[in-house]
Image (cartoon, rainbow, N blue to C red):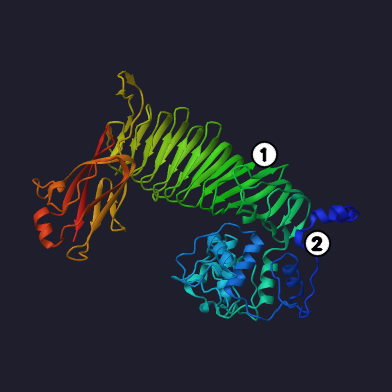
Amino acid sequence: MLKKWMVIALSLVMVLSMMPVGAYAETTTFSDMPDDWSTAALQSAVDNGLLNGANGKIMPQENLTRAQMAAVINRAFGAEKVAVLAEYDDVTASDWFFLDMAKAVAMGTFQGSGSKLNPNDPITREQAFAVIARALNLGESDVAPDGFTDLSEISGWATGEVYALVNNGYIQGSNGMLNPQGYITRAEFAQVMYNTIKEYISEAGEYSIDVEGNLMKNSPGVVLTDSTVVGDVIIGDGVGDGAVTLDGVNVEGRLLVRGGGAESVIIKGGSTIGTITVAKVDGEVRIFAEDGSDVGTVLIDGKDDVIIEGTFENIVVNAPDITVWARAATISSSEVMGEESKLVIDKDSTVEKVVLSGAKSAVEVNGEVEEIETAESAVNALITVEKDGKVGLVVANGAGTAVEGEGSVEAVEANADDVVVVTEGTEVTAAEGVEGVMAGEEEVDAGDTATVEKETTTSGGGGGGGSSYVSPRLLGATLNGDEASISGNDITIEFTNEGENGEYIIVAEFDKEVKIKSVTSLDNSSVNIQFINENTTDVPTGYSSTLNYEFTHTITEQHFNVFGDVFEVVVTDGSRDLTFTVTVNH
C-alpha cells in the first residue's frame, strides 16, 4: 500500500483527480475554528461543503437546528428529489430551508409530527441519530448497546434507530451517556458526520483510493478502480439515474445504493462485496455483477423496482409492493419477504431456491428454479410458471398458495389448507390434516397424491387448447379501512355501528379482474342486496381487481334482524365464478 501511495504522490494531476471535490476547493478560514477534538471533523465538513458558516465564523458551539441538519444531510448525499410539503403548515416557499426540508422528506430522513416539521427547533441528539440511521438505511435494532447509563431516556419512537447507529459504531457517547434528549452542537454533529463518512467523491471521473471508513459517491459517472474500502461504499442520492462502476474494488462493509438508474450500478473486475443494500426511494435501479465478481447478499429495501443481473449468493426482497427482475442471473437463494412483492425470473436465469414469506407475495418463473417454498406467513402466495419455465419442487406451507401457468412443475407438497395447483402434469401431495387442496379440478384428500390432468378449454374462435387456469382468488377485505379476517373463501368482519346514517364500504381484493354477479343473504334467501331498498348502491357491473360494495341506508339492529349476518357473494372473471361468504359480527 505504501508503494501505491508513493507512486500516486508523484503526479499532482492524479492526486487532484482522486480527491473529493471539496478537498481542492478554495480554503475558507474561520476566526472561531477551534483547536481541539473537533477541529479535524469541522475542517472535513467545511472542505466537503457540509458546513458553510456565516460572516467568517463556523459557530462550533451553537446548537444545530432541524433545518440546518436537513441541509447537511442533503449535501452529504447529494439529494435532489423533492417532496410536496402541503401537509406541513410551518414551512413556506419563502423560507431559506424550504427546498432542503422538501428534499429531506423525499429522502425519508425527516418525517415530521402531525402538520409540523419544526425546522427552526434545535435538533435533539436522538433526533439527529435517527436521521443518520435512516439515511444509512440501518433499520432498527432491538439489541440495547452496552456501556450506557441513560438508555431509558431515549424516546420510544427513536429507540430502534438509536440502537442501530450505536451498535454500528458511529456513536460513542461521553462518560457512559448518550444524552438523547440534549441538543447537539455544530461541532458535535460535524464529529458524528466525520465518524459516518470519511471520504467524498463529488465529481465524475476515475478514482483509485483506499479508505478506512465509509466512502460517499454522490455524483454520477464515477468509476472506482483497484481500491479497498474498510467500511461502506455509499452511492448517494445525487447519482440520480446515472451510472457508477466498481472495478476491482474490495468493500469490507456494505454497498449502499441510494442512487442509480436502469443502467447504473456495475460491479466487475473481480470486485468483492459482502452485502448490497438497495434503498433508492424513487426510480428503478439495476445491479449488474459481471462474472468473476463476488457478491454475497443483495437486500432490497427501497421503494421502487430493481433489476438484478449477474451472479449472486442471495437476494432478499424486504420492501413491500415492489417487483424485482432477475435477468440473465444465477442466484443461489432468494426470499420475498415484502407483502405483495414479486420476483420475476427471466428465461435466461436460474435460481436454486425461492422462499415466499410475505403475505400475497409472488414469483413468476420463466427460467429454471429447483425449489420454491411458501412459508406459513405467505398467505395467498402466487407461483406462476410461464410456458418455458421449469420448477422442480414446490413446498406450500402457506394457506391459499396457488400454482398456475403453462410451464412445468414436477411436484407440489401441500402442507397447508386451500392450496390450488393447475400446472399440467404436476404431482400434488396433500399432507395429513389439511383440506381444500386441489390438483386441477380434483380435490386431493389429506394423505393422498393426485396428478393435474390436461385440461381442454375453448377460446374465442373455437378450437381446443391446453392452457391451465386458476379461478379468481380472494386476497383480502376491509370494512371502512379495517382489515377483515379471511379463512379460505370466508370473510369475517367486525362491525361497529358508527351512526344512524353512516356510509359503510366493504372492499374485497382479488388476484385478477372480476365483477360481482350477485350478493345474497344466506339468513334470508329472498333478499338480494341489489334490491334492499331504494337507497342501496347497485352492485358493480364492471371488471376490477378491487371491488367496493357501498350502502348508505340506516344501519341498526333491525337491519340484521331483517337481512341476517351472513351473505353469499358470487364474482366472475368472465370464464369462471368464485363464491365466498361475508359474515358480519355485530
Identify the residue shown where x is 81% and y is 53%: 17
Q: The N terminus is located in which quarter? A: bottom right
- Residue 96 location, x and y as percent? 60, 70
Q: Which percent across, then down, holds residue 2?
A: 87, 56
Q: Amino acid at mark 1?
A: Glu
Quick one: SS at disc 2?
helix
Horizontally, residue 189 falls left or right of residue 434, namely: right
Which residue is pictured at 24% across the width and 41% down the height?
541
Q: Nearer the viewer, residue 284 or 256?
A: 284
Task: Determine which quarter of the picture holds residue 16.
Answer: bottom right
Q: Which mark is residue 290?
A: 1
Mark earlier in primary sequence (1, 2): 2
> Left of 377 or right of it: where is 228?
right
Q: Give the residue at mark 2.
A: 24
**Looking at the picture, does residue 579 appear above or below residue 482?**
above
Q: Secondary structure at mark 1?
A: loop
- In this rendering, the label closer to the viewer, 1 or 2: 2
Residue 236 in view: no
The vertical placement of 467 against 480, above or below, is above
**Label 2 CA crowd tier, 10 Å (few <14, some 14–19, many 20+):** few
Q: Nearer the viewer, residue 240 or 9?
A: 240
Amino acid type for the residue under numbered disc 2: Tyr
Q: How many marks?
A: 2
Query: Residue 449, position in %: x, y?
Result: 33, 32
Furthest residue toward right: 10
Alpha carbon separation for disc pair 1 and 2: 34 Å
Where residue 493 appears, as percent x and y from the top left, is 24, 56
Label 1 packing within 10 angstroms: few (<14), some (14-19), many (20+):
some
Which quadrant of the view contains residue 179?
bottom right
